[in-house]
């Protein structure tokens, strides 16, 4: 991904502006969640995540329908996703010690994806052409589970453990399925 190829107009497309907005919502959510004292406060933090999720849904549709898909947007959207999900998981780990394992898995999975992506770009100029279906499933399951934990802050501990365990299993599966994809890309020189 060559930053020099980005046009100045790409920075100001509606989908990319929505991506910036999502990134700006991350510290807002963190502050609201970490300072929450009541169910209403937790609900407010969850609503910020809901707005971020709706923005994520619409930025892609707008980009495709109005021909505003850009290389910057292809980078910005997953970065906003990972920052949002990472912030949510970290905040939940402050409240629920059981989530720390999930935090570690998230860091390992996303760290692997980032490092391999950068190494492939440097080695042979190749990049993963969008998320695979199992990556999308992992993101969807993770968001659904953590959103439930945000919406229902008084869930019993077994339910919290079940949701965290589900996320952990899906993350491990996605990581295991991505490893051979990156291995194959590593073996294949740019054509």
Image: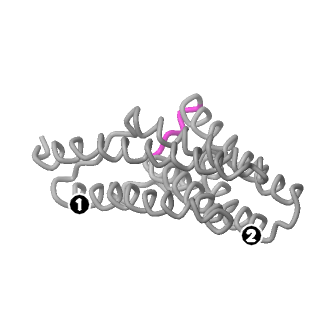
As drawn, 177 above or below 46:
above
**Circle 1 or circle 2, nearest the eye:** 2
Instruction: Name which residue lies at 86% across and 56% down.
Output: 39
- What segment is highlighted magenta in the picture? 66-70
Separation of marks 1 and 2 at Cα, in angstroms: 36 Å
In this view, the residue in front, 167 or 74, is 167
Taking 30 as reference, is 77 left or right? left
Dividing the picture into quadrants, the one containing residue 180 is: top left
Q: Which mark is residue 34?
A: 2
Residue 113 in picture, x, y percent from top left = 34, 54
Q: Which mark is residue 3?
A: none
Dividing the picture into quadrants, the one containing residue 11 is: bottom right
Instruction: Name which residue lies at 51% across and 55% down.
Output: 82
The residue carrying mark 1 is 119
Instruction: Name which residue lies at 54% across and 31% down.
Output: 64
* Quadrant (top left/top right/bottom left/bottom right) for the N terminus: bottom left
């Amino acid at each position: 991904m060559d930053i020099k190829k980005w046009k100045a107009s790409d920075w100001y497309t509606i989908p990319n502006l929505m991506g910036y907005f999502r990134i700006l919502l991350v510290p807002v959510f963190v502050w609201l969640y970490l300072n929450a004292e009541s169910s209403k406060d937790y609900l407010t933090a969850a609503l910020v995540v809901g707005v971020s999720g709706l923005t994520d849904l619409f930025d892609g549709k707008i980009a495709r329908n109005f021909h505003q898909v850009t290389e910057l947007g292809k980078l910005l959207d997953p970065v906003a996703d990972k920052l949002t999900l990472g912030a949510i998981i970290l905040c939940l780990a402050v409240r629920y010690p059981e989530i720390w394992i999930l935090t570690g898995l998230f860091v390992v999975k996303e760290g692997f994806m980032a490092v391999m992506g950068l190494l492939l770009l440097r080695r042979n100029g190749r990049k993963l052409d969008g998320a695979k279906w199992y990556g999308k499933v992992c993101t969807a399951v993770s968001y659904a589970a953590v959103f439930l934990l945000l919406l229902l802050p008084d869930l019993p501990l077994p339910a919290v453990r079940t949701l965290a365990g589900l996320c952990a299993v899906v993350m491990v599966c996605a990581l295991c399925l991505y490893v051979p994809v990156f291995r194959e890309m590593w073996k294949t020189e740019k054509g």
